[in-house]
Image (cartoon, helix red, strand yellow):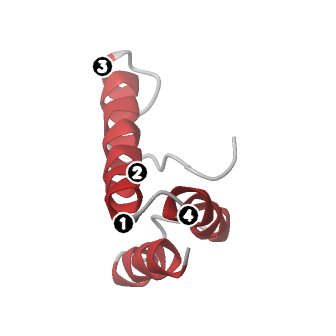
Amino acid sequence: MIFLLIFYLIIAIVTPGVLGAADIRLAGLLGLALGWPGWTTVIGGALLGLLYGSLTGAIMIVLRRTTRHSLISFGHP
């Protein structure tokens, strides 16, 4: 839980305005759930979450629902 929380917090600090507080809280909760099976699951879950977010953004740009400058939230609709 702490690993993902800190990882997403670092991303939020390095790139201000990209991740919100809800995204960071969601990462902490996901880290809690993914941490039970082991580190491989935590790292895989973190990377897959970022990959799915990137794919969602790319599909939305292709469908012209958003621009490449729009922010896509992970934590809330």
How far from the left and from the top, in percent, is residue 14? 34, 82
| Mark before the other along the chain sequence, 1 or 3 | 1
Q: Residues within 10 Å of mark 4 (few under 14, many from 20)?
A: many
- According to the picture, the residue beneath numbered tag 1 turns out to be 39
52 sits left or right of 20 in the view: left
64 sits left or right of 74 in the view: left
Mark pair 2, 1: CA separation: 10 Å
Q: What residue type is disc 4 on?
A: Ala
Of badges 2 and 1, nearer the viewer stands 1
Q: What residue type is disc 1 on?
A: Trp
Q: Nearer the viewer, residue 15 or 42?
A: 42
Count of marks overlaid on the render = 4
- According to the picture, the residue beneath numbered tag 3 turns out to be 62
CB atoms of marks 1 and 4 within 8 Å = no
Q: Residue at x 61, y 66 (%)?
A: 32
Mark pair 3, 4: CA separation: 27 Å
Q: Residue at x 56, y 49 (%)?
A: 73
**Which quadrant is the N terminus positioned in?**
bottom right
Q: Nearer the viewer, residue 44 or 69?
A: 44
